[in-house]
Amino acid sequence: MRLLEFNDNHGGANPRPAVLPQKSAAKTARKSTAPKRARAGKKQPGQVFPINGSNAIKQPVRRSPIDLEQLQQRIEVLERRMRERANQGTKLPVKDLEQLKQRMKLLERSVHNELWAAKQREHTLLEMLTRPPLKTALNKRLQRFVGQTLPRTGRWFKSSGQGWWQDNQPLWWPRLAGAWQESLRRAREY
């Protein structure tokens, strides 16, 4: 049986390897001059890995609010250009008209989306304003518990107890009365 030899460097807690590998002089020279690089599988303390790919957590894209005045100005500019072309007598190409229709639909959809989001935010804020503060809500619940729940519970226990008393009295009352009569008779006889 072989005894383990313990390293004195770490307080004797780590056993020494049985065979130490021989290092070549070229490897040791190259190793000493080259900077240490992190292995692919191990992370060094303080080293940060970038998040790439589909596993990255994406922040929701917040669109800037639509400026209705600027949108109105853009529509006026487009209408003016169309009138100028129509006055010059040149026909607008179908492609340009289709592109303009698509732009208008996109702008209209974005305006509708912005209005819907604003209505949702307004509705949420109004709900938050109508909701009472936590202290008030807790006080109301406590008052309801003390004023309604406790008396109802007490009445229920009282009626249940009276019902049990009425239901079970015929079972034990004759036995109690008979035992009492028997004890009185025995007391008289002695």
Image (tube, grey):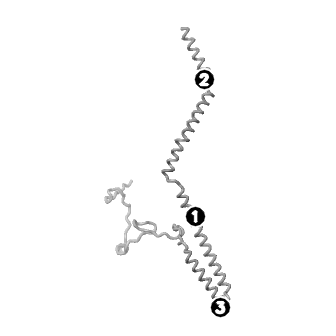
- Helix, strand or loop status at disc 1: helix
Does residue 76 sit above or below 176 in this rendering?
below
CA gap between label 3 and label 2 equals 113 Å
The residue drawn where x is 49% and y is 69% is 51
Which residue is disc 1 drawn over?
Answer: 120
The residue drawn where x is 60% and y is 69% is 113
Please tell me the numbered disc located at residue 88.
3
Q: Report x, y in % for residue 184.
A: 56, 13
- Helix, strand or loop status at disc 2: helix
Which residue is disc 2 drawn over?
Answer: 172
State which mark lies toward you, 2 or 1. 1
State which mark lies toward you, 3 or 2. 3
Q: Report x, y in % for residue 66.
A: 55, 73
State which mark lies toward you, 1 or 3. 3
Q: Relative to the observer, which residue lies in front, 61 or 9?
A: 61
CA gap between label 2 and label 1 equals 68 Å
